[in-house]
């Protein structure tokens, strides 16, 4: 997931019913959400929704204006505005769920941070230009067998994987049943649950991925881990025994690929871009990769996405693959990016 940028809200108008609302954001304060630094836990100005908690019903949406937002608007009156619509918003047991429309894309925003957890491009293009694309490089370096996605969200990674590898059997784990219902209705998740022409499919499991209700020992060829809450990697994933348990669910030669977010220690001043650190030991500044390296000594590789993609770290277990072979077995769009993986080495 990647965090929303700071933003200023200029207006909110009810259209018809409880699910259609109009939002206008200053474009200078809202660059494409999936490219924003995920290490930032909150935008400087977050969208503040008042949601009525309900097991199934849509929540009423209110807007809490702030003096800071008003001042920001006054300072930027001359700047162009871009329109966004809230398609639906509801509070579940686990999340504040907001689905936002733009002309080009639809975004799933979760929890109090309103971080972007999924995106669908309306033009039929499943590439996102963000860390979800990295996950699509996993199938060629795993044995034949099902691949689990822990933290399915709205299915962004699953959608691209099934496009590129239509024979792959995916199991998407998501703890929030209401989120899955909304993703089926508004994000096209139900279409991914239908078998492809090559026999691949997505099976959705509503459960806690870290404590599954069934025995999954040795089941998976690969596991994609994208588990976040409140803008950061789940606390459970900072424990070595948890990773050892996940590894026990892999077939021989199976691998885990992880979205590790950014560097929490990075301090970013207002209106200043995060600096891209390229030193080979920078992975040691990411707490999740450090734990992975402790759990699997000498068997963890890493890469950092470019500045335009949000400075995410991604990690891979199982040792460094043959990068040349890997490059030759992925789509052209991924062929150069897979060459950027490096083995975690202590300086």
Image (tube, rainbow, N blue to C red):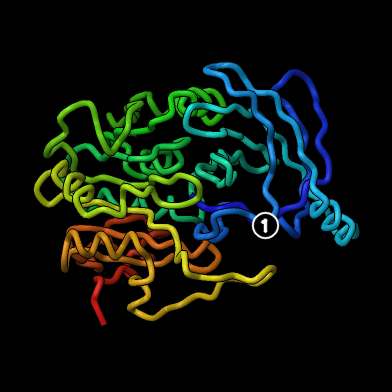
Return the x and y of residue 330 as percentages of the image width and height.
Answer: 32, 56
Residue 264 rendering spot, x and y as whole percentages? 46, 64
58 lies above or below 230: above
Decide which of 203, 317 is in the foreground and name it.
Answer: 317
Above or below residue 191? Residue 112 is below
**Occupied quadrant, residue 296:** bottom left
Return the residue found at the far left. 252
Residue occupying the point 32% across, 27% down: 205
**Tag 1 secondary structure:** loop
Crowding at label 1, few (<14), some or many (≥20) Cα neighbours within 10 Å? some
Q: Is residue 293 left or right of residue 55?
A: left
Q: Is residue 321 visible?
A: no
| Residue 149 appears in view | yes
The residue lying at 49 percent from left, 24 percent from top is 178
Residue 48 left/right relative to 40: right
- Is 145 on the left-hand or right-hand side of 62? left
Q: Residue at x 28, y 38 (%)?
A: 210
| Residue 243: x %, y % from top left | 22, 50
Residue nearest the viewer, comparing 272 with 133: 272
Q: In this figure, which residue is indicated by the disc labeled 1?
A: 44
Q: Position of residue 214 (x, y in %)?
A: 19, 26
Point 64% across, 71% down: residue? 269
The C terminus lies in which quarter of the figure?
Answer: bottom left
């Amino acid at each position: 997931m990647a965090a929303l940028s700071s933003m200023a809200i200029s207006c909110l108008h009810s259209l018809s019913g409880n699910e259609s609302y109009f939002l206008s954001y200053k474009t200078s304060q809202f660059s494409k959400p999936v490219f924003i630094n995920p290490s930032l836990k909150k935008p400087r100005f977050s969208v503040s929704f008042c949601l009525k908690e309900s097991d199934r019903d849509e929540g009423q949406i209110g807007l809490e204006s702030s003096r800071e937002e008003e001042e920001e608007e006054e300072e930027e009156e001359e700047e162009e505005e871009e329109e966004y619509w809230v398609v639906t918003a509801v509070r579940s047991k686990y999340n504040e769920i907001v689905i936002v429309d733009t002309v080009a894309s639809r975004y799933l925003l979760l929890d109090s941070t309103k971080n972007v957890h999924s995106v669908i491009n309306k033009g039929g293009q499943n590439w996102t230009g963000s860390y979800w694309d990295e996950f699509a490089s996993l199938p060629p370096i795993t044995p034949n067998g099902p691949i689990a996605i822990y933290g399915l969200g709205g299915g962004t990674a699953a959608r691209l994987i099934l496009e590129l590898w239509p024979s792959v059997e995916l199991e998407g784990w998501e703890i929030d049943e209401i989120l899955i219902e909304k993703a089926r209705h508004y994000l096209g998740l139900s279409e991914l649950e239908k078998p492809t022409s090559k026999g691949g499919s997505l099976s959705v499991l509503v459960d806690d991925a870290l404590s599954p209700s069934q025995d999954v020992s040795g089941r998976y060829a690969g596991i994609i881990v994208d588990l976040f809450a409140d803008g950061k990697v789940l606390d459970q994933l900072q424990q070595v025994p948890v990773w050892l348990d996940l590894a026990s669910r892999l077939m021989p030669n199976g691998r885990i690929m992880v979205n590790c977010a950014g560097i929490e220690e990075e301090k970013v001043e207002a209106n200043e871009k995060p600096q891209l650190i390229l030193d080979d030991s920078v992975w040691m500044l990411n707490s999740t990769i450090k734990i992975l390296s402790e759990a699997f000594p000498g068997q963890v590789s890493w890469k950092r996405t470019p500045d335009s993609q949000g400075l995410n770290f991604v990690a891979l277990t199982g040792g460094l693959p043959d990068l040349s072979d890997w490059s030759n077995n992925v789509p052209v769009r991924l062929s150069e990016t897979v060459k950027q993986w490096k083995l975690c080495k202590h300086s």
